[in-house]
Image: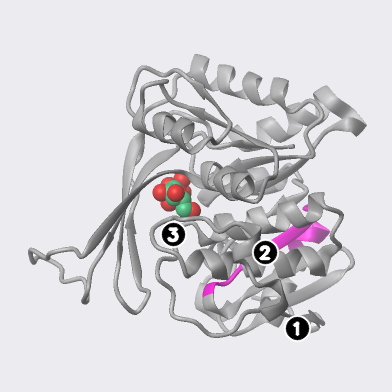
Amino acid sequence: MIITLTPNPSLDRTISLDGVLARGEVQRAVASHVEPGGKGVNICRALEASGVESLAILPGDALDPVLIALTEAGIPHLGMPIGASIRSNVAITEPDGTTTKVNVPGPVLTPAQQTELIELVLDRADGAGWVVLAGSLPPGAPVDFYADIIRKLRARYGAAAPKVAVDSSGAPFAAAVGAGPDLIKPNGEELAELTGIPDPEALEGNPAMVATASARLVAGGVGAVLATLGAQGAVLTTKDGSWLAQTPPMVAVSTVGAGDSSLAGFLLSDLAGGNAPDSLRQAAAHGAAAASLPGSTVPALNQTKPSDVTVTQLTHPKEDVQ
Ligand SMILES: O=P(O)(O)OC[C@@]1(O)O[C@H](CO)[C@@H](O)[C@@H]1O
């Protein structure tokens, strides 16, 4: 069983253009998709598509379009009523795979609502294999919201605590990293920010540098780092080493949610007893399959091609990343 918490979920509208996005112009779209979203929600959608038991915890009223869509899709979820609408985020995709995304802040969670949401997670985590804390925080939540949940889970369940994965951004991600989660899933930019690399482009095309930066986080108490690098693949770093996964070149249809599918692929392999390189392979296969699907559509296991993924072990270069 995998529990996800999405404290700032969204209704995702993806608009497909048949040309390049033109700022300041009126353009006609060729298609549009609406899906219930937010990172943890997408992870549960991907797990459900592969028959893995999960529960999506999120703030949202029973009649909110996001919760209605989750019910219709048969995604197990637990909504905490907030008396406000879940935000709507927009993605615009171009034929070459370029995706432009605009995310809005979302409704405020009061301190009482934050406490209630945390209690829901703590209660439901009993016996779970993983708890995934995912996405941005809603306005009003303190920076250490995720870090606090990690500490509370360990305090309540001790040695029986579920493993915790975190995928967020900015200061809340950095604070969560400080609490030593079992797994984090940064993209290149987030990894640079977490490790103090001033120019994220330095990591582009340099998996060894990604591995070195990730290894520092592992040395600092993070269990594993799954760095997703878009078309350049993914790098997994644990205390045992680093591996690079690469998928065959492709033109993406929509990259929205590809990282969430990657994390779902990793978790379902891990739950099934896969070792680190196996789980990385499934993460990369899930990410590539998601990028080939429109909107934030998530792939099922049988739509992924792990045999097309090349996994190689990396050695960390001696020089420090500055
Ligand atoms: O604003 P956040 O919480 O960082 O990200 C939200 C979001 O971009 O993440 C998912 C894709 O990963 C989408 O479903 C959703 O719109």
Q: In the image shown, does 266 or 136 lie closer to the viewer?
A: 266
Decide: few, some or many residues near mark 1? Use Cα within 10 Å; few <14, some 14-19, many ≥20.
few
- Reading the image, the residue beneath label 2 is 283
Residue type pointed to by label 3: Val
Residue type pointed to by label 1: Glu
Q: Is residue 191 visible?
A: yes
- Reading the image, the residue beneath label 1 is 319
Q: Residue 296's x, y, as percent?
A: 43, 55
Residue at (72, 60) in percent of width and height = 225
**What is the number of the mark on residue 256?**
3
Q: In which quadrant will I find the N terminus?
A: top right
Q: Is residue 221 visible?
A: no
Kindly indicate whether the residue at mark 3 contacts the one at mark 2 (C-beta within 8 angstroms).
no
Of mark 2 and mark 3, the one earlier in the sequence is 3
Of mark 3 and mark 1, the one earlier in the sequence is 3
Left or right of residue 45, residue 86 in this image: left
| Highlighted magenta segment, given as a residue range | 216-230
* Mark 3 vs mark 1, CA separation in Å: 34 Å
Left or right of residue 16, residue 216 in this image: right
